[in-house]
Amino acid sequence: MAPAVPPPPQNTGAALELLVHGVGGATPQEMLGDPRTVRVTGDATAAVYRRTEDADGEQHPERYRDEPVAEAYCWSGLTSGNGSRALWLLLLPFMVVNLAHWMRPTATGRRRAVRLYGVVVRLVALSLTVLFTAAACEVALDLVAWQCAGTSACSERRSWLGFLSSHQGGWWSQPGRRLALAAVVPAALVGLLWYLSNRTWSAYESQSPLDATDADGSDPDGTEEVHGPGAQGIADDPESARPVPPALSRPGFWYGRRLVSRLRAAHTAAGFLTVAAFVMGAAARHDRTVGSSVPPVFGLVIEAALLLCAVVAVWVVCRRGRSESVRDTRVDGALITYLPGSALALLGLAVVHAGWSRPEWVSSGSLSGETTFRLLALGQGLLVVIMALVARSLYRRAPEPRTTLYGLGGPSVAMLACALGGVMTGGVAQRVADWLDGPGTPGTGRGSIIEGPPVLLSWQASVIPVLLLLLLGPVVFLVVRTARRARRMGPAIEAEYAPEPPDRARTRRIARIRATAGLTDSAPWIIGVVSAATLLLGSAAVVGSWASGEVPGLATDGAAAPVESFAEAAQSMGSWLIGFGFILFVASGRRAYRDASARRTIGILWDVGTFWPRASHPFAPPCYAERAVPDLASRMSAWTATTQGRLIISGHSQGSVLAAAAVWQLPDSARRRVGLLTYGSPIERLYGRWFPSYFGPVPLLGLNRSVHCWRNLWRATDPIGGPVRLSAVPDPGVDRGPLKDPLAYGRTTALPLPEPILGHSDYQADPVFATARGALLEELGPRLPRQGADTLEKGQKSSGRSSG
């Protein structure tokens, strides 16, 4: 007997408005305007709430003839919840380089170029892990264990180094044993990064979806990375083209478990191998000298094993990108277990080898960190240049006028990530060297008792004042241009609020805020200038350190007096600035750990920076959208399936980006039942320009055609939100703006106090908001018709939707 078919769900007549807050977070009480709320679904980290009186709204549609049932999705706990997340600030370079992966220009059918771009970004990310580990080795192994503990004048000032001091002749006084003990510090740092990545992976990326499918066996290299989002085919041959859905609508886009686990294994192995190379390098060099008590063949065998393991780690990073066509639920268990384990075993073997007794070994000078940092700097610069060439090639194939820096946004951001990594690592090394040397200045020969950090770090620090001087010109230009633009706005603003009598002070304030809000559109060029200057000056620093072998102040001895004075001033100021920058990072993290308001402010940075999945660096802060987008999509699907009712998802600021991403994840049948309301939205102004492959003109136009209706509200005073700028004939009519801000120009009897200029906040206070929401509800209708031929044409004329 065939099972009974359940009756189709009936339309209750009720409408739902799902509110999604923006950056900084908001409480459900604030979003719903009622102190009495109840959690509908979710947990303490992210959940959907209703007013208590609306808990059973679906059962009483007669109560909601004029207003929809309101629900609030609160997701701020994913980014700015407990205090430990403030420590994510130290992972800023990892987060920035992860963004570069998603900034690739729009690509159609460029299989090799798109794959090369992804491989290069992952290699830049791997170099940052090696750089951070090398900096820890420089501090612990070189400055402390090798230089300070090996110099009696330095170790005598630090009583805690007494048992390591070479002049005491204890068991730990031999250089190899000192290095073996100090290796615990950078190895612990690598272990901490692995632990944080694994912990956040368990919370964000390890949850298997409810409708998970089998592993992506037909896509071993990752559809998205090979072909690019929105690609029209599966090969370079246009004749074999077949439609590919937008990237953000793919089932596996918000499920990056397998790639993150692979990258975490490779980066962890690279960190352990870096520590082993520092330990092993010093011991192997000594063993190759005459009179060593340890045969050099042992060191050669271990170094060959380290090299082999490093090649495997690089191969793992290059081999596979993201797989998004289906949810890939497989885990490379053997790789994840054996690669980091093998690297850790090799580190242990290197430590044992270095700790072998060598009574004749005496530490002097510094370790070979100079070569390591030079090769890292050169490698990062070369990789960024390759990224730029590939990005320009992709951009020329499909140019879009609004794309930032003509497709060079990704390489520019990757260069900034390398610069941030250099500032943080260099700042730590120089501050520790100054602390160990007391009144002396390491590297200058002026009263210093230790050699100090690598010369390259001093050259890189000297670049910072020069970079600030170069930035002075563009900053002055923007200030002058903004002031002139504000003056030109005056007559138009007074005409806008006519016939109210003009008030010069009020007009100037409105004009200044509008002109300042426009500076957001100039940010790409500032970033481009900084990145280009960083690349050129960084290259000059490498050449200068390599050619002279001395810090800038000593390298210019005997030169013209102005040149020598400038070099010494740049070196001193750069050293101070690089140390101050690192201290500022630490102080901000410490304050945010204790202060909830400061933690919320820092959380805004992660709201924007961690929207994207970890595609290149596994130690970056986790992607909260891998939890938030499925939450929203599941809630909308459940509502439309059980009630067949009208639904508006209403997103402000970053919440509008989450809302759009969630709508893309809906099935076609559910997406056509949804109205989208965005306000203060950066979806085109920031995301469309910086991430054109995912939020460019073509994806946004497709989103508008796939939903039932869409309205976007924006203000000229908003520095973040802006119009969507859909280009289609006829005009889809999505944008509504610029809204009047402030709502009233001067004081009146009804409004005795001046109305505030709202800018990016309180869009609901504008009457246009209620009008737009009501219009969306009217377009959705009390009961949605079937998508037949007779209704489709009418629906397209009224809302710009399509059945595709």
Image (tube, rainbow, N blue to C red):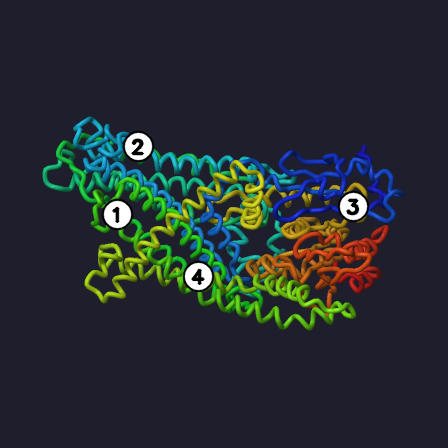
Q: Residue furthest top?
A: 171
The residue beneath circle 1 is: 441
Within 10 Å of disc 2 (Cα), the crowding (few <14, some 14-19, many 20+) is: some
Within 10 Å of disc 1 (Cα), the crowding (few <14, some 14-19, many 20+) is: many
The residue beneath circle 2 is: 348
CA–CA distance in space, label 4 to label 1:
30 Å
Q: In which quadrant of the rendered view does residue 796 lie?
A: bottom right
Please say if 569 is above or below 277. below
Q: Quadrant of the C terminus?
A: bottom right
Residue type at numbered disc 2:
Gly
The residue beneath circle 3 is: 16
> Could you say which is closer to the camera, residue 618 or residue 478?
478
The residue beneath circle 4 is: 530
**Front: mark 1 or 3:** 1
Proximity of marks 2 and 1: CB atoms separated by less than 8 Å:
no
Secondary structure under badge 2? Answer: helix
Residue type at numbered disc 4:
Val
First-in-chain label (2 vs 3)? 3
